[in-house]
Amino acid sequence: MNNELRHPLTDLTAGSILRVRDGQGRAIVVFEGRVWITLEDDPRDIVLDAGESFSVDRQGLTLVQACRDSKLILAHGDAGTPALSADELHQWAHTQRSQAIGDALAASVTALQRAVASALATASMLISPRRPAPCTTVR
């Protein structure tokens, strides 16, 4: 399985702004937090929460401001790849998030199993009864 992200996560602290010039065809996919998106010459205000996405549908300046600490991906459309709808992007983001949570949980369970095995091995050495050395008497 390939766990490598095709697009790196972008961390935005609360109040910080990501500026995207001429982003038409790109998608903003939010994994954590909440962002507010506004586009140049567009009266809409778009607010996205974790697991939601938005396809930038115009050229010009797009501002993405973090309402709280957030993690997102600004996905670039690949040449020859059809654009995904907002629903498809949302499903993709949900799948990626679920996979990341599953991977982290599996790693945590493995680490816990190792720690328990190590603790049991150490405890068994401390409490195992010691056999007395045989006595030898000379007559």
Image (cartoon, helix red, strand yellow):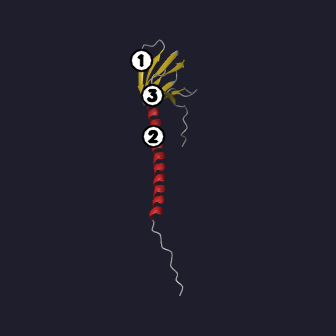
Residue 98: image x %, image y %?
44, 38
Q: Residues within 10 Å of mark 2 (few under 14, many from 20)?
A: few
Labelled disc at residue 101:
2
Query: Which of the two residues, 114 or 106, is positioned nearer the viewer here?
Result: 114
Q: Which residue is mark 3?
A: 69
Q: Which residue is mark 1?
A: 45
Q: Quadrant of the N terminus?
A: top right
C-alpha span from label 1 to label 3: 19 Å
Count neighbours of disc 1 (C-alpha within 10 A) and say few if under 14, some if 14 to 19, many if 20 or more: few
Q: Is residue 52 left or right of residue 10?
A: left
Above or below for 89 versus 130:
above
Query: In the rendered structure, which disc, 3 or 2, sits on the residue that comes first in sequence?
Result: 3
Where residue 97 appears, as percent x and y from the top left, is 45, 36
Q: Secondary structure at mark 2?
A: helix
Q: Nearer the viewer, mark 1 or mark 3?
A: 3
Q: Earlier in the sequence, mark 2 or mark 1?
A: 1
Residue 11: x and y in percent read 50, 29
Secondary structure at badge 1 equals: strand
Asked whether the beta carbons under mark 2 and mark 1 sit within 8 Å of each other, the answer is no
Residue type pointed to by label 3? Asp
Disc 3 vs disc 2: Cβ atoms closer than 8 Å?
no
Location of residue 54 (image quadrant): top left
Query: What is the number of the mark on residue 76?
Result: none
Kind of element beneath mark 3:
strand
